Each structure stands twice: as C-alpha cells, then as structure tokens.
Image (spheres, helix red, strand yellow):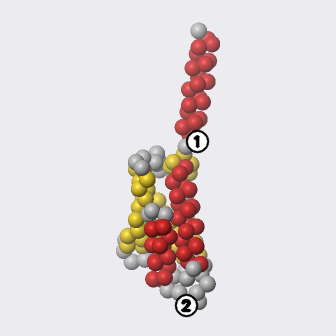
Amino acid sequence: MNVRLVTLLVVGLFTVSLIGCRTAPIYNVDDTLVATNKADFTKEDVRKAIIRAGGGLGWQMNDAGPNNMEGTLHLRTHMAKVNIPYSKDSYSIVYEDSTNLNYDGTIIHRNYNGWIQNLDKAIQVQLNTL
C-alpha cells in the first residue's frame, strides 16, 4: 500500500512539473529605440514598418488610435492580442488579451513569448530597411 501511495505521489508531482514547464512569465517589449539607416524617417515610417513586420508573421495589424497599433495573431485554437504604442523614437509590445494560452495575470504559455520576440525582431528588421 505504501509503495502505491509513493508511486502515485511521484507520478502526480511529475505531471504537475510538466504542466508548469509549458508556461513562463509574460514577455513585453518596453520602449525599444527605433534604429534605422534613414536620416529623415517619420512616425508614419515606423507605423508602416510595424504593419509590414506583423503581416509577414501572420499578425493582423489595425490602427487603435493615435500612435497605437493593435496586433492579433490566430494560430490553431490560440489567439494573442497586443497593443503596440509607437512614436518616431520608440515602440513597445504589450500584452492585451489571449485565448487558450493559460494566462493567469503573470504567466502565459511559453509559445506566446516566442511570438512576441519574433514580432520584435521583425519590426527591427523592417525599421533597418527604411
């Protein structure tokens, strides 16, 4: 009987640890400086770079007020939505909402962070091509 109880506890702890591995602290991009080779770029150039970067990765990018974009990504049964405030000098990518990503206020499915990192890199690439 004790062997069964110990086995059950070990299996239960192992299962819980696997579930925990699928989540990570949420990743936001805060005030990344705009770097470009173009001397006379504008805020509109930054906006267009964000749209091109997101579109290339499957994000739906929409204007969400002055100096703000909203990006939505749908993958299988998952949805991630972010706010992207921007200016001529910087931009951020901030979590707004999600579906089926186990968000609990501080942690989220680890794939989300990869999607945000990819979006950030794509924005930087687009800015460098200005």
Secondary structure type for disc 2: loop
Residue ID at (46%, 48%)? 101
Secondary structure type for disc 1: loop
Task: Return the mark for residue 49.
Answer: none
Task: Return the mark for residue 21.
Answer: 1
Look at label 1 and name its amino acid.
Answer: Cys
Percent across and percent down for residue 22 are: 55, 43
95 left or right of 89 in image: left
Look at label 2 and name its amino acid.
Answer: Asp
Relative to the observer, which residue lies in front, 77 or 1?
77
Task: Return the mark for residue 40.
Answer: 2
Percent across and percent down for residue 47 are: 46, 77
> Residue 85, relative to residue 74: is it above or below?
below
Please say if the residues under marks 2 and 1 sit with CB atoms less than 8 Å apart: no
For marks 2 and 1, give the CA distance. Answer: 46 Å
Q: Residues within 10 Å of mark 2 (few under 14, many from 20)?
A: few
> Residue 118, relative to residue 21: is it above or below?
below
Residue positioned most to the top: 1
Q: Earlier in the sequence, mark 2 or mark 1?
A: 1
Relative to the observer, which residue lies in front, 38 or 103?
38
Percent across and percent down for residue 18 are: 58, 36
Residue ID at (49%, 63%)? 57
Residue ID at (43%, 53%)? 75
Relative to the observer, which residue lies in front, 118 or 9?
118
> Residue 10, relative to residue 52: is it above or below?
above
